[in-house]
Amino acid sequence: MTKMDFLERYGQEDEPYVCASCGNCTLVCPVFRELKWESYGPRGKLHIVKSIIEGEGEFGEDFAHKIFLCNLCEHCTSVCTTGISLDRFWEVARAEVRQRGLMPKPAQFVLDSLKARGDIMWMGSADRLLWMEDIEAIVKDRVMKSAKVAYFLGCNVSLKSQLHDVARSMVKIMEYAEVDYTILGDKEICCGAPLGWAGNFEGINEMAEKNLELIHSLGVETVVFSCPSCIQTWSEYSRYLKEENDLELLTTSQYINRLVREGRLKFDEQPMVTVTYHDSCISARVLKVTEEPREIIEDIPGVYNVEMTPSRQSTRCCGAHGLLDVVDPVLSSRIAEMRLRDATVTPASRIITECPRCILAFDLAKFTTGYDMKVQDITQIVAESLSPNDVGGDEAK
Amino acid sequence: MKVDEIRIGDIVGADNVSTTHETCMIYSKDVTSLPDMAYQIISPKFDVVTQPVDVPSLQNLVWYALDNNIPLVPRGNGTSGWGGSIPTRGGICVDLSSMSRILYFNEFEQAITVEPGITWRDLLAFLGRLGFTLPVYPSSATAATVGGFVASGGLGIGSTRHGNILKQVLGIEAILPNGKIVRLGKVMLDPKSDTLQEKIEEGNSWLSQELTAAGLGTPEQESKLITGTYGTLGIITKVTLKTIPNLQLVPFACSFYSMTDLVNVATKIISEAQPYYLRFLADNYTSKLRVLKGHELEEGKYVLTGALLDTIYQNEDNIERIQVITKEENGTTLDDKRAWFYWDERLYPLRIKRHGPSLVPAEMLAPLEMLPDILDETKAELQKSKVAIEGTLSNDGSSSFMVWILDDERKKISFTIGWQRSFQIAALAEKFGGLPYAVGLWNGRHAKKFYGDHTYKELKIMKKRLDPNNLMNPVKVFGGRVTAGRISTTFGFLVGFIIALMGGGFVPSLLGWEWLTQLMNSSLIQAFPVPLLLLVSFVGGFAGIAAIRLMTLNQALSIGIPLLRVLSKILRK
């Protein structure tokens, strides 16, 4: 019989039995919606876990692969009738997959990259400065400077050229609002989130702590993140944050909304743009940040938001979260195409979001489907709508 | 059973068929955890799972099953707990969740036609956008399919005003066990997109003759053949349902110190305010809901909750009246926020399972006025068990009385013994003039009473005519032979062996029949010196196996349940 004592180790031994088999999780699961068979959905996977516990199944390569065919999008958790924290359960199962040496190769690559380079793409700290090209004069004095606000870019925004404009836009916004801010530059390392997705819980705190030590030394009170997963990871795993509760972690939309409410950002009339806001899974379901981006969009004259169905906390995953984009890029892209279709049936010509993974996923889905739709981060639409007449205006760019 | 996966793949599409152990195991479950012992009388899993996407491929699949004598079991999303969609003899699972299109909606006729695999949630969302809703939908609406609920029948949200779901079905299309496609009642479709007209004409004309021969009415009058019969007489492929305008919804909730007060108020509310929905939660239910912690007026109290769906003026009057009635019966009307909380919770009765972690469900249909007595008796009968009780009230003086028995399936022996409590509740229902809530697989013994003698007789006649080989969802509703597992086969052998041994060994000496005793101890064949008694015992053993194999499920339950009951008394479980 396959030993499943890891469930007890993580306090999860009751959960497969607590499942009411109501099927709510299965119907919202993006992987199930694409692959159709219950053995890929949460309810089916819990049945498999039960059958392994009962000695009727094997914790083998096939099951290990299925455990990684998941976006960890928190949708199943949010609809679970009996309150099972399913995403935590899948992460624990991934930890066991790792223990048993059954990791899918791409996920192992991510772990190796984090260990060797401190990022998810086998790049390096020097590459974290590439986004500053053209605005070096503005940001060079901001790197590792004592300030009240720190802007934490995350691996994707720092290292992927398609996303460099997100960081530049955020810099433009903060310069415009005359914010006293700092960035970690090449000292920033991965927040640790992909470690959890790959089942290595032990390393997360260490990575979070390395960043937090720097942030703490700069006297920072508020950290603004371009990637919501970084906030989730630090909130859940950082011992420092659990002990010292004096650091405020905000998404870019939360922070920008605050600036707007304080009257520090002024917008110019835009030429009639209809957008649709895509809630990223972690922002909406974990951080409950659904209204701030909508309030910002509403404040930009000429920009109109139409809602996708579903939206807010029922939002659908873009397919790229939870390492699915590296473990099964084709499946990940098909999920993104499904979500993109939700956007294309609205009158919107542009998708706005606040998650770098969603932007990458939709860009790829646009390519595979041929849908002509602009995809932007909330920072980008804000930055390009700022009124040039105000102090700080376009100088940042 | 050997199934030809490739041939089935040709019929329903290669991507829509699976024979993997995992898939077959998962699709063989519903919301109830069964003790291992149950798999000694039914098969543990399907041989193949299919996901047909249209009616012609489903028709071909039925023909294939008929030609090869393979059982077919239709399945929605497996959200029921009465065994309607689980296998009894292996065979083909027909997962209908891929057939989920909305085919027709006409707001003037107030009717909508859908495929069976659409979930009630999706259907409600579609209608909601157009300003309509459904008169009745199940409390499992978030995942249950239209086909599943219509095939099983029952009370749901809205039943307090509109009755059973089956009253909301205007028409139904189904594939009969012989592969013919028929339409019963009034199926509404756009004639331009109705591609099955010829097949329907042929199927309905054949069915008319069969119905006439059986002394029944026309297909238009006989939708009861397919609704509420768990797919034993055909697989649902289209359903036309009534719709109603989505007027102003006003939820309300009141709490009481006794079930008698709650029932008094409920009776008055039903007659005076005609609510859309009325549900009660007993004290043992509210005391277990974590979210009620700290709500002194609700935690551990009896809660009556419901909703009015009417015009603003009507609702205002009725809400005032509900407040007065509640006060008269020593109850407390809860504020709007709490009322909305209970309205949102209507779709999550299974939350209680966290306290198990396993659940043995038992549900009965009982007269409303008997609820306090039934509640007391249930509490007394199940005093050693952890239970939570709730139910839905109907406008015809009946109510569903749901007993969630919380247990732990990991404790194999006690869970197996405790399984009989579900049947105990069904017996209790009868004592109070009630019925089991559903027939499905496990309550086949009560089918005659459930459907009524006359209707059951008609259904049985049609089952014989339409499905003589009993391939369509076998054993459900009408009963049938068990699928003997290894343990039950061994048990049969041992019982037969021991009876024959005792009979051949002791009875002759007790009766003083020396000649028989000598004969039993002698060997018939000199070269093979085995006493005849041993041979007779083996014959007895094999007769025991034959008896087990020929036993029907209802007979097995009639023997097994009292045995488990005795065991539970001995072990004080």
Image: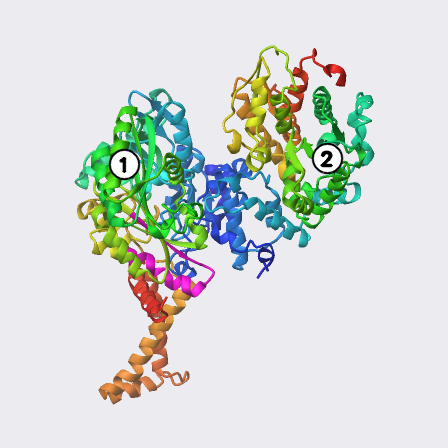
- Chain of the residue where label 2 is placed in the rendered structure: A
Query: Residue B170's quadrant in the figure?
Result: top left
- Foreground residue, B65 or B16? B16
At label 2, which amino acid type do we have? Val
Residue A358 vertical position relative to residue A96 in the rendered view, above or below: above
Residue drawn where x is 67% and y is 49% of the image: A201
**Numbered mark located on residue A220 in the image:** 2
Any magenta on residue B417? Answer: yes
**Numbered mark located on residue A38 in the image:** none
- Foreground residue, B16 or B329? B329
- State the extent of the magenta-drawn residues as a range: B401-426
Q: Is residue B395 left or right of residue A93?
A: left
Residue B296 visible in this rendered orientation of the protein? yes
Judged from the image, the secondary structure of the residue bearing numbered disc 2 is: loop
Residue A377 visible in this rendered orientation of the protein? no
Q: Is residue A341 left or right of residue B431?
A: right
Any magenta on residue A280? Answer: no
At label 1, which amino acid type do we have? Gln
Residue A302 at x, y percent in the picture: 58, 12
**Is there one chain holding both mark 1 and mark 2?**
no
Residue A39 at x, y percent in the picture: 52, 45
Label 2 environment density (alpha carbons within 10 Å; few <14, some 14–19, many ≥20): many
Instruction: Give the alpha-carbon distance from disc 1 to disc 2, as whole Å.
Output: 55 Å
Query: Residue B538's quadrant in the figure?
Result: bottom left
Q: Which residue is mark 1?
A: B323
Image quarter (top left, top right, bottom left or bottom right) of the C terminus of chain B: bottom left
Residue drawn where x is 46% and y is 63% of the image: B411
